[in-house]
Image: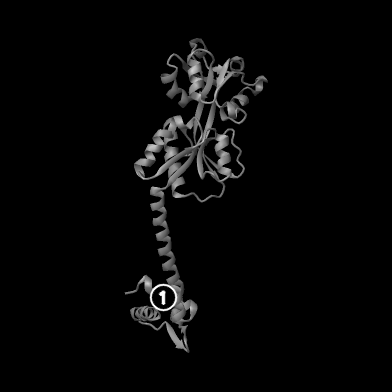
Amino acid sequence: MLSLHQLRCFLATYEHGSLTAAADELGYAQPSVSEQVRALEKSLGVQLFRRVGRGVVPTTVADTLRPHAEKVLASVAEAQDAVRSVRSFETGTIRFGMFGVARLYASAGLIADVLARYPGVRVELVGQNSTAVAEDLRRGRLEAAMLAVAGVRSEGITITPVAREELVYISADPARLATPVTAHRLALATLVMPETTWRAEDSTRILLRQLLHETGRNPQTRIEVEDVETAVEIVGLGLADSVIPRGAAEQLLPRLAPNAGWVALRPRVWDTFAVVHRAGAVLSPAAQLMIELATARIREIAEPLGR
């Protein structure tokens, strides 16, 4: 019966034109290689080599067999690599980029989803702001990420929108929530805004600046903080109002500012969440898994795009 061992001995002999040289390459005794080649010839019912001096010359049948033998052994090697990749995947580390507010939508549930499938992996969710995560992608520190893309430059990366989320105005003053907040009202509001380190590139602030462009003003912040939770708490204390994604408002207001509420902007403003990776990259199974699971989690809260 034809075996992989026979094919390896055949190809080594074919390449070197010598049973002895083939044995040296494979690390076998020369009689063992000779025996494997004879067994292959017997199995196929053909002569593969003719002896010439101290070497051998392949027959026409051997010429025909060679590419097929190479394909078989290459397929076996690919299968072994695939199994090793999965085994390494199941016990290795998965890193995925995630912008700050997205952790409210997906982080804990996403980690639970991953560990439910691969209990042996180590998970790293990396990032605070979309701009910083995108830079990590460009530098090769991350393979893929989920970002809010309003402030992200597209050079060198592929952006695939998966969902959109409405930005809403939050306040502890019911009178300010009676009607949608216009650009004029927003320009006059006293605001607390998160993401102060990335205020120039933050997607929410970029969208608000675009909204206020016709008024000739920028959003006026009285208070600057880093995280959205602190901003929501300050709103709950009545010290300022804010604009945050609706999903974040729905999750945080009941817990951190139960006396506050939210209302839409006029016109309505949407931020886009997207899967991002380096342009032309062949994504690993780990990255593909994280993209699949993160997309599903984001779409449970935000409005799906591109289905």
Asked whether the viewer can see residue 186, the reply is yes
At a point 38% along the width and 79% down the height, the residue shown is 37
Q: Residue furthest top?
A: 175
**Location of the N terminus (image quadrant):** bottom left
Q: How is the image coloured?
A: one colour
**Residue 234: % across, % down:** 50, 17
When the figure is inspected, residue 252 is found, relative to residue 91, above or below; the finding is above
At a point 53% along the width and 19% down the height, the residue shown is 242
At a point 66% along the width and 22% down the height, the residue shown is 214
Residue 64's image quarter?
bottom left
**Residue 55: % across, % down:** 47, 85
Q: Dot 1, how many residues are within 10 Å of its Cα: few (below 14), some (14-19), or many (20+)?
A: many
**Residue 135: % across, % down:** 58, 40
Asked whether the viewer can see residue 65, the reply is no
When the figure is inspected, residue 150 is found, relative to residue 71, above or below; the finding is above
Q: What secondary structure is marked by label 1?
A: helix
Q: Residue furthest bottom?
A: 53
Foreground residue among 44 and 55: 55
Q: Label 1 sits on what residue type?
A: Cys
Which residue has dot 1 on it? 9
Foreground residue among 57 and 209: 57
When the figure is inspected, residue 239 is found, relative to residue 138, above or below; the finding is above
**Residue 203: % across, % down:** 57, 30
Q: Residue furthest left?
A: 1
Count of marks placed on residues: 1
